[in-house]
Structure formats: structure tokens, C-alpha cells
Amino acid sequence: EAGVAQSPRYKIIEKRQSVAFWCNPISGHATLYWYQQILGQGPKLLIQFQNNGVVDDSQLPKDRFSAERLKGVDSTLKIQPAKLEDSAVYLCASSLVSGGSPDTQYFGPGTRLTVL
Amino acid sequence: AQSVAQPEDQVNVAEGNPLTVKCTYSVSGNPYLFWYVQYPNRGLQFLLKYITGDNLVKGSYGFEAEFNKSQTSFHLKKPSALVSDSALYFCAVRDGYNQGGKLIFGQGTELSVKP
């Protein structure tokens, strides 16, 4: 079974530029998550989708971050404009279901973003 | 509010010795607890989880974890460490009453196993 795919693996941009990350979850997984992992910290949830609907985006900085999952499969996360503090690894994860089920989340390899 | 604490930034163990990576948690309801491992430039790999039932949970690569409700702990253990176990370990919790799927992670513990 193929795992969660993410691209690009690495990205370096100047501050105030824009950037987009792509995620393809495990086939059949209805729930998709984007986490931000700053160096030396544990991952922090940015946004959670159930199919193509948003379940939780309470910690997404909506003035600069946006995400979509139009057909309930692939997802993109965008930052515009980027700030220095956005330098982090962006992890995508997926699980079969969410809600009341403590389903295991499976993570992709991540995209390491460096903002100069 | 939910939280997870991993009190040790780093754990050093000699190969062949038992290892323990500590985790304590705080949730408002019944906890769902997870351990993940992260190798350099890789994503998080799932090791094991506790949902309900037996307090001793067995997972991948010979790891196990013991759930202790009274001490609100979920320590990761392995009877005999390998050099290849050297990595960053994360404990995570999800509130059983939370209808979303958000995991709250600890800050991570760097495990170093020396030959």
C-alpha cells in the first residue's frame, strides 16, 4: 500500500513570496491533516479535512495560510506572503475516518520550508 | 486543555540495555495515546497506540508502552535497545470526547543508543 505522498520535499523562498505544498493521502482515507513542525517542537495541527469539508482550522493563520481539498482526495496548502517564522516542516497525514474513532494517522515525509 | 509532556529532551542508552522514554498527559476525558518515531528528514512513523483494554500495548519493532491512568503516564519501553533505534520519539494524545481528530504532541525526546 502506498503511503502519504508530499511534494516538494524542500523549498527555499524569500520572505513575502508565496509557496504551495501538495499532499496525496493514502487511498481511501477520508480524513486529511496538515501539521506544522517547527525545529525542536512537536507537530501542531494547522487544518483538518473530512472528505472536502473543513473540520478544524482554528490554528491556521488565515491571513496568510490557505488550504483546499477540492475533490476530497489531494490537498494543497498555500502561504502568501511568507514570513521568517514560517520556516518549518509541513507534514501531511491521513486516516480512514475521524470523529469518534481514534483512527491512526499516517504521515508523509514532509516539506521542509526555509524562508530567508 | 489537552497537553502532553515529555520530560526528557534526550535519553542515552547502551545497546542491549532496556530503554524507557517518558510521557505524561492531561485530557478532560478518556485519553487516546500514541507513540511515533521520526528519523532524520523523514515523516513520523506510527509505533503503537492505546485506546482501551490492556494497559500494556505492544507495537512495532519490539516497542511497548504502559498506560497508567493514576499517574497519567504512557511510557515507551523496549527490553533491549538497538543502535538503529536512535531517533526522535513523539508522544501524542487525543481527547476521547473530542469529535475532531486532532493530535496534541509532546516536544519530542531524542533517543541515542551507543554500541
Image (spheres, helix red, strand yellow):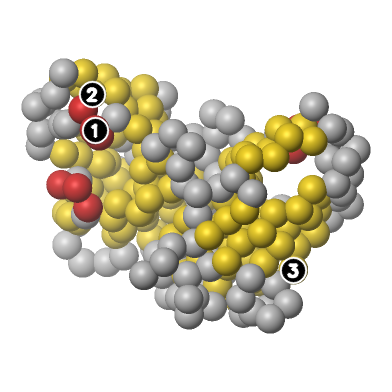
| Residue denoted by label 2 | B113
Q: Check whether the beta carbons of the residues at disc 1 and disc 3 lie within 8 A of each other.
A: no
> The residue marked by circle 2 belongs to what chain?
B
Q: What quarter of the picture does the C terminus of chain A occupy?
A: top right
Residue A20 appears in the rendering: yes
Q: Residue at x 21, y 27 (%)?
A: B83
Q: What quarter of the picture does the N terminus of chain A occupy?
A: bottom left
Q: Residue at x 84, y 40 (%)?
A: A82
In the picture shown, does residue A76 fall above or below B90?
A: below
Location of residue A24 by image quarter: bottom right
Q: Residue at x 66, y 59 (%)?
A: A22
Horizontal and vertical percent for residue B55? 19, 56
> The residue marked by circle 1 belongs to what chain?
B
Disc number for residue B84: 1
> The residue marked by circle 3 belongs to what chain?
A
Residue type at mark 1: give it: Ser
Provide the secondary structure element on which disc 1 rests: helix
Disc number for residue A68: 3
- Marks 2 & 1 on one chain: yes
Horizontal and vertical percent for residue B69? 28, 52
Location of residue A38 by image quarter: top right
- Marks 2 & 3 on one chain: no
Q: Check whether the beta carbons of the residues at disc 2 and disc 1 lie within 8 A of each other.
A: yes
Instruction: Rate crowding at label 2 as few (under 14), some (14 to 19) or many (20 or more) other CA atoms within 10 Å.
Output: many
Q: Residue at x 74, y 68 (%)?
A: A68
Horizontal and vertical percent for residue A61? 80, 50
In the picture shown, does residue B85 fall above or below A55?
A: above
Q: Nearer the viewer, mark 2 or mark 1?
A: 1
Provide the secondary structure element on which disc 3 rests: strand
